[in-house]
Image: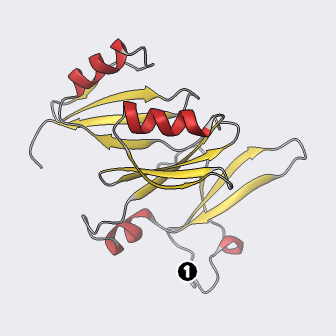
Amino acid sequence: MRSRPGLHAAPPADRLPGDESGRGHAVREGRRRPHGLRARSLQPPLRARLRRAPEGDGSPLTVWYHVRDLDAGRRFYRETLGFTETYFDAAAGWAKLRHGEMEIGLAQGEPQEDGGVAHVDVTDLKAEAERLRSQGIEVGVVFELHGEIRLLDVFDPDGNRVQLAQELTAG
């Protein structure tokens, strides 16, 4: 079984309440904090979660980012990447924005270096890369996989990574 960094097979003590087998679950461990403890979360198998949510059911996948300046972050995602704001709570310091099936949650705070990565589909990745570069936005290199998909990493003003993707072949 191949493992990914930070994911471990769950020992019996880490089973979900009411779960008899514990098979297929994973424990995600965070970095060790100054007090010596690690945050741990138990996750059910990805395949089972994907089977439960039919494609195109309208439920977005949400990735959360911490941003130092919430207004600047909201502006970046709306004006630069074309997201639509669906919720904003100034008092609590957070907002949600959506682009297709991807939803981003922004929360006021110090950016996390090991956070999630939002995946956004675009129709012309190379043109999008040029447009973003011309605006002075930090972007990576266009990466093409086997003539099937192009990928590009884009970084918001706080260094949070968003991955743009263009499917090249009909699936």
Q: Which residue is mark 1?
A: 21
- Residue 134 found in image quarter: top left
Residue 114 screen position, x and y as percent: 61, 39
Front residue of 71 and 167: 71
Front position in the image: 15 or 82: 82
The answer to whether residue 81 is above or below residue 58 is: above
Q: Is residue 142 visible?
A: no
Establish if 90 lies above or below 165.
below
Residue 48 spot, x, y in % from top left: 39, 71
Q: Residue at x 88, y 47 (%)?
A: 36
> In the picture provided, is 166 more to the left or to the right than 63?
left
Q: Position of residue 59 (x, y in %)?
A: 36, 66
SS for callout 1: loop
Q: Is residue 65 visible?
A: yes
Judged from this view, the residue extending furthest toward the right is 35
Residue 143 relative to residue 21: left or right: left
Instruction: Please determine whether, in this image, residue 48 is positioned above or below residue 63.
Output: below
Q: How far across and down, in percent of the image, does residue 160 sit? A: 54, 33
Q: Measuring 42% from the left and 14% from the top, which residue is drawn there? A: 136
Counting other residues with Cα less than 10 Å from the Cα at mark 1, is it few (<14), some (14-19), or many (20 or more)?
few
Q: Residue type at mark 1: give it.
A: Ser
Left or right of 171: which side holds 31?
right
Q: Nearer the viewer, residue 9 or 39?
A: 39
